[in-house]
Structure formats: structure tokens, C-alpha cells
Image (cartoon, helix red, strand yellow):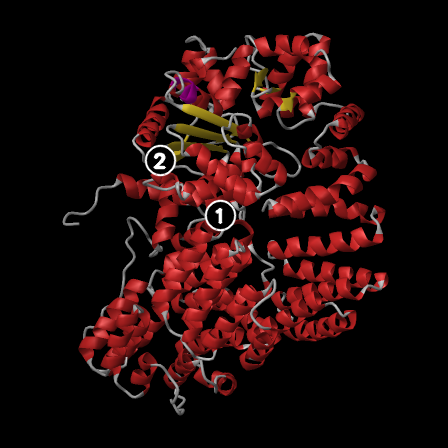
Amino acid sequence: MVGRRDLLEREAALATLRTALNDAQGGEGRVVLVAGEAGIGKTSLVRAFTAAAAADGAVRVLHGSCDHLLTAREHGPFHDVARQARTDLAAALAAGSADEVRDLLLAEVSVPTTVLVIEDVHWADEATVDALAFLARRVETLPALVVLTCRDDEVLPGSPLRRLLALVRPPGGLRLALAPLSARAVSALAGGSGLGLRLHAVTKGNPFFVTEMLAAEDEGVPASVRDVVLERVATLPERTRTLLDLLAVVPARVDRALLDAVHPDWASDAEPAERRGIVELADGGLDFRHDLSRMAVADVLPGARRLGLGAAVLAALLAQEPRDEARILHHAVLCGDAGAVAAHGPDAARRAARAGAHQQALSRYEQLRPYAGLLGAEERAAVTEEHAWELYNALRFDEAVALSEEAVALRRGLDDAAPLARALVGLAWHRYLAADVAGAAATIEEAVQVARAADDAEVVELARSYRGFLLVLADREREGLAELDALGGSGPLASVRAIYRGLATAFLGDPAGLDLLERGVADASAEDQREFVALGYTALVKSARRLGRDDAVRRYAELGAARTSGIELRAHGYTLEAHLCQLRAQEGRWDEAEEGFRELLEAAPQAGILHRETLPHLGRLLVRRGDPEAEGLLERAWALAERTDILPVLVPAGLALLERAWLAGDPGAEQERVALLLRRLDRPGVERQRGEVLRYARRCGLTLDHAGARPEHQLGLRGDRHGAAEEWARIGDPYERALELAESGEPGPTLEALTVLDELGAGPAARLVRTRLRDLGVDRVPRGPRPDTRAHPAGLTARQGEVLELLGEGLTNAEIAARLVVSVRTVDHHVSAILQKLGVPSRRAAARLARQAAAEPAPAGR
């Protein structure tokens, strides 16, 4: 067996884990993320730590692992934990109750002192991520240590796991990034022979690769680790190799019941491989010691052999009770067993959805889709509708519309009015989110008519409720209120109708809407309607923003993010995070805002009407920075505005284009758009938006009636620049404050404005202010920020500076993304911008400049 020899150079990591455990024993819980590439020694480190921690009996260790199935099993690792739990966690898992699973896990780790280890969270399902995030937010007050292992280089952009990783931050969260072994350590493992240096060159210091090659007891260095694994397996008895083939097609620990069914003599046949450290018996099942070994064996299995073994496993799983639908579907898909996929796919998908594992539910519906023709007519229609809703949960609205249309067609063929009306309601909602506002309106009207024909009171309430919602969202708040009021305050959608009443009231300019919304959120919370709670916070954020209550925007957005997760943080979370990005931009935190907007756009490219919260705001920010990428973003934003023709989309896109025209010195082009916006803003409840349009129209030289604007805009429109600047200072918007100071006509305030604009990086506005200063007769106009040729040769942003430093450390884009908790694509964007600004051809050249800057002493006096 490979022992502690692969723990060389892990003393600091073990010490960090011990310190975290000491904190937990003192009542200050911790989450520790042990990160690194496959084979880096995460499992070996954690097992050495937990073995020592549990030795005195005062620490209880719970352990679970995520499996590498085609689609992860919902709450996968907690099934392992349940076998060790004191609570009835197994029953909650069987029932598929996400809330109960979270509560019971919290109870488990509240027992002093508990170490919960979850391995391979890069394979975790969404429900598991949701539960771990729930624990991570509370662990600081618990006598518990939560240890997660993760191949952080395999976390994709948009993955729900990114939310969990973002929670692992001081003081309650710690990150351990395991590095490869040094050449000295590899040489020590090799007994000090000359083989050590050659091994290090081949393995790059990966501990698993090193130990596998040394275990082969070969004088030379084989061409690949896979060759080594297969070489070791080839020397085992034939029956042991047969067992390993079986284990290789099951990407999870194989429990004893399944082993007994497919390989009755598994215990004796496993012994030779166990003695050699290839497999291990743990947590009630048999598994390869490392997934890389399993993959090596699986990769060389002939197709027919793989199919036969998979079919045997599938047959055994079908014979078990209770049935594990997730594993059955995995093997049915791999074996191409159409009957098994059709028979078990719907239940597997629905179970994942109920547990909150919506990514996994979507994956299962997609696996089922090629076999939909084998389903009965009613089941096929139901599965198609459910699939559409999972696409909605994934913010893939265009695809949701296509499947909803298919579901409606199937329902029409079944000639049952009530289910057809429900399908039409779903189609209307998906069309609205896909930015087809007119199509949504027509569809919901048909839904109401069909529901009335069905003579089903519940379906009529559903259709009329959604008609009210869509009217509120389409600038027809009074009509929407009338519809919602007519439906009363009871029924299954009562709390949602209350939320939309509050939203409509606020949108009409009445602050009482916020009180109505808070009561609606409280009602939804009391009824444990988590999605409606998230909807309520989204409505609160939108309403507070419309009413100019920016202090409340932040509070509601942060509360909403803290109180919701999983599915609720998809559509609703997109809006919550986007509004936080808008606030960051307003506060002058432009790097953070830009990065946040880009993350949202990248994670949800099909987000349809939700792009109103990101596209125009990012485009406007880039206009202020003089970034040419703004043009394409604003074209997309205005196309979305024209397609939807509703104020929440028209106003931010129109304002961004208006500011672009002013900064570019081409204000005449926007007269028609200004007239359009002001016509639409001639109504109560939009004073903030109307004032902003009027203020920028005035900067473009258009003189208009400025009635109906808020104080920060009214003061500037009346010529009280100092008063307006003070108001913007109170609000916390340095850019707008600087613009008002710049129009004071006084050299002192104008110079102050220039300093602020230069600090923000607002190049286009700063150029206009420099021209104004010269017109005022100022002889010495500051030239502006000169690039620091040592650290940032072209005036990199703060975030770009961080990325450049990490390039200098030799990190890959994936490693930089993990370090900064952003997506790889975001890092790619930063690297491209850095190369352009530095005028160098490659990341290697940029890294060389970074290292040179780091090595040179700072000039005297700095």
C-alpha cells in the first residue's frame, strides 16, 4: 500500500487544517477548500488529517464523495454521510426533500466537534452545492469543520459550484492550493537515485503519477502514467482483472449489494489489487484508489466488453429495491437501452428537480428526449413541459419557448382544455422572458379563454394571475392591478399576486409598494415558498431602484442572495447580482462592476429580457471608459429595447446611447430617441428615469421642460451645479458629481472634477473637461494619469494589474480564474486587454514584464 510517503511537502497544509480544527473546537467553525489538479494528493492529505483528528475519539468524521456519473446523483455524497449520521438523513434523502436534507445536515455538524469531508465537489450536483452553501453561510457559529476537495481547474463558467467557492473566504473560509512536489521530494521518494530527476521531469511532480511509477518497480520511466497503471493491472490474476473491468464501468464506489449481484466472489478477487494499492474497501463499497486509475482501465476496454459489463450492472440495478433511478439512467443511456431510458428517465428527472438539482434534472430530460416517442401521449406532453421549465431555470429562454410550443401542440392533440391552458400559461411566460412581449400577451389571452372554456376555477385563477403579472411587467400597471385585485387574496398564487401588487404600486411611484412587497415576501417565507421569496426580493430591488432608494437596493439584493439559492438564484439571482453591479458602477467601483456584468453575460448568453439589467449598463460603463467594445453591446441593447418596447428595457439602453452621443460630440443624432423616451416617461413613477434623460439631453444641447425630475437632476437642470454636486455626493455617485462640478464655470471645481474623472478612468469625459479648462483660461491643465512604466505600462485597471502579477507567477488562465474566483473566459478577456495595452505579442512576454517590474526596486520617495 502507498502510505505517508506521498505526504512530503504537505506539512504547511496539515498545519492549516489542524488550526481550522482547533478553531472549530472552540466554536468558530471553518470551511476549508483543498484544491488542485487530479492526482495532486488532495485525498491523501485529507485522510491523513482526519485519521489523526479522530484518533482521540473527541472528533467525529463524516465522509462523502461525489460520483462521476453522466449526470450527478442528487445529493450524491450525502448518501454516504447518511450511513454515518445520527439523524434520519437517509429518510430525507429518500423523500427528496431538499429543505429537510439541509436542516438535518446542519443538525449533524452542530454536534461538537464534527468534521464533514466532501470529496470531488467538482462533480457535485446542484442540490449538493446548494446544501453545502447553506452550511458554509452558517459554519462560523458551529463546532464544525467542513473540508471540500475540488479540482478547481475543472469548474466551468456558469457552474453553480462557483457560488459555493466564492463563499470560501476569510475569516470562516480557507483555501489550500496543493502544489506539485519539488524535484527534491520526488528524488527522496525514489530513494535518492538518479531516477528521481527523470521522474520529476515526466510527472511534473504530480504525487499520484510519481507513486504509480515507483510502484511499477521499473528501472526506466514509462511513456505515460496510463501505461504504468495498465502494466500493474496486467500482472494481477485474471479474475481480479475481470473485477477491475467491472469497477471501471461504474464511475462511483460500488456497494456490496451490487458487487454480490454482478461478481459474487468479489471479496477474494479484490484482495490482490487491494494489497497493491489499486483499489480500496471503504464506506461500505469497493472503488479504485484514484479515479485516474479507473479511467486508465476504462479507456482500453473494447466497446463490446464495456457494453456487456454495463448491461450486467443495469440488470442488477433494476433488480434492487429501492431503485436508484440516477444510476439506472446513467447505465441505460450508456448501453443504449431505449426501454430503460423511457421507463426510468422521467422519474429520475423529476426527482432531481424536486431536490433542487436543476442542472441534473435538465441533463436527464435531455438524455430522455431522443426516446420521447416511446412515451405515452400524456407522459410525453408532461415531460416536454417539464423540460421547458428546466430550460427556463437554466436561463435558456429561446429553447424553453421552442419546447413550450411543442408541448402546446401535443396538448392540443389530446383535446383536454385544462392542461392545454396550463401549457399556454407556460408558453406565455417563456415568450416574455425570451423578450417576445407581444407574443406573450397574445398567448396569455388565449390561455385565459381556454381556461374559462375548461370550467376549471384553479386553471382560470392561474391564467388570470399570469395575465396580471404580464400586464404589470409591460408598463400597464393599473390594468394589472385591477386584474390582480379582482382575483382576491386567497388561493395557491395569493402570495405571488401580493408581490406583483406591490411591484405595480411602486412602479406607479407610491413608496407604499415597498411595504406591500415586504409583506408578500414574509407571507411567501412563512409558507416556505422559496422561489416566491426570491421573486419578492427581486421585485423589491427593482422597486427601490425605480423609486431612487439606492440604500434599500443594496440591502434587498444582499438579503435576497443570502436567503435564496439553487434555482432561485438563477433568473431572480441574475437580477439581484446585476443590480449590485449597477450600484458598484454608480459608486465608482468600475473594475468590479465590469467584471460582474461580464460574468453574468457569459454565464447566461440566452437570458433574453434579463439582459436589460446587464447589456446597456455594461455598454454605458465601457462608453465612459472609452472602450470600443461598447458599440456592439449598445447595438444589442437597443435591439432588445425595440423588440420588447417596454420602459425597463428602453430607458437604460436609450440613456447609454445618449451619453455616448454626448461624449462623442454628436448629440444631434439622439434628438428623435430623446423625444421617444420622454413621451414614454410622461407618467407617474418614473421621475428618476425622466430626470436622467432630461439631464443628458441638456448636456447634448437640447432645452426641454424639466418638470417631473428628482432633486439631483432638477438642481443641475436649473443651473445650480454646486447644489447638484452635493446631492450626487450624498447619493454616492462620483462620476455624476464630477460632471456637475465640471459645468460650474469655475476653474477650482472644474479642476476637482478632472481629478475625479482621471481617478475613475473616465477618459472621454476627462478630455471634454480639459477642453473646458482651457476655455476658462487655465494655463496649466493637468495632463492626466501617466502610465507607470514599471508596474502598468499602459495604465492597466486594478483587476488587470492583479491578473498581470499572476501571469508573472506563471499561473495559467484556469489557475488565475480559481485564485480570483472568476471564470476562465473573464480571465481570457483580461489577458487580451493586457496584451493590447502593453503592446506585447504573447502572455509569456507579458509575464516577463511582470517579473521584471516585481524584481526592480521602487524609485526613491515612493
- Mark 2 neighbour class, 10 Å CA radius: few under 14, some 14 to 19, many 20 or more: many
Prevailing secondary structure of the magenta residues: helix
Return the mark for residue 417.
Answer: none
Q: Mark 2 or mark 1: which is in front? A: 2
Total numbered badges shown on the rendered structure: 2
Q: Does residue 34 appear in this view? A: no
Residue in the image at 64% along x and 43% along y: 352
Q: Nearer the viewer, residue 295 or 259?
A: 259
Residue 191, position in %: x, y?
43, 8
Which range is magenta? 48-52
Q: Secondary structure at mark 2?
A: loop
3D distance between C-alphas at marks 2 and 1: 28 Å
Q: Nearer the viewer, residue 435 or 523?
A: 523
Return the mark for residue 823.
Answer: 1
Q: Which mark is first along the chain, 1 or 2?
A: 2
Q: Is residue 731 above or below residue 239?
A: below
Residue in the image at 69% along x and 13% along y: 266
Amino acid type for the residue under numbered disc 2: Gly
Residue in the image at 53% along x and 73% along y: 649
Residue in the image at 82% along x and 63% along y: 416
Amino acid type for the residue under numbered disc 1: Ser
Res 850 → quadrant: top left
Q: Nearer the viewer, residue 628 or 137?
A: 137
Disc 2 designates what residue? 29
Q: Secondary structure at mark 1?
A: loop
Q: Does residue 61 appear in this view? A: yes
Residue 632, position in %: x, y?
53, 67
Residue 537, position in %: x, y?
46, 62
Q: Is residue 412 above or below residue 478?
A: above
Residue 558, position in %: x, y?
40, 57
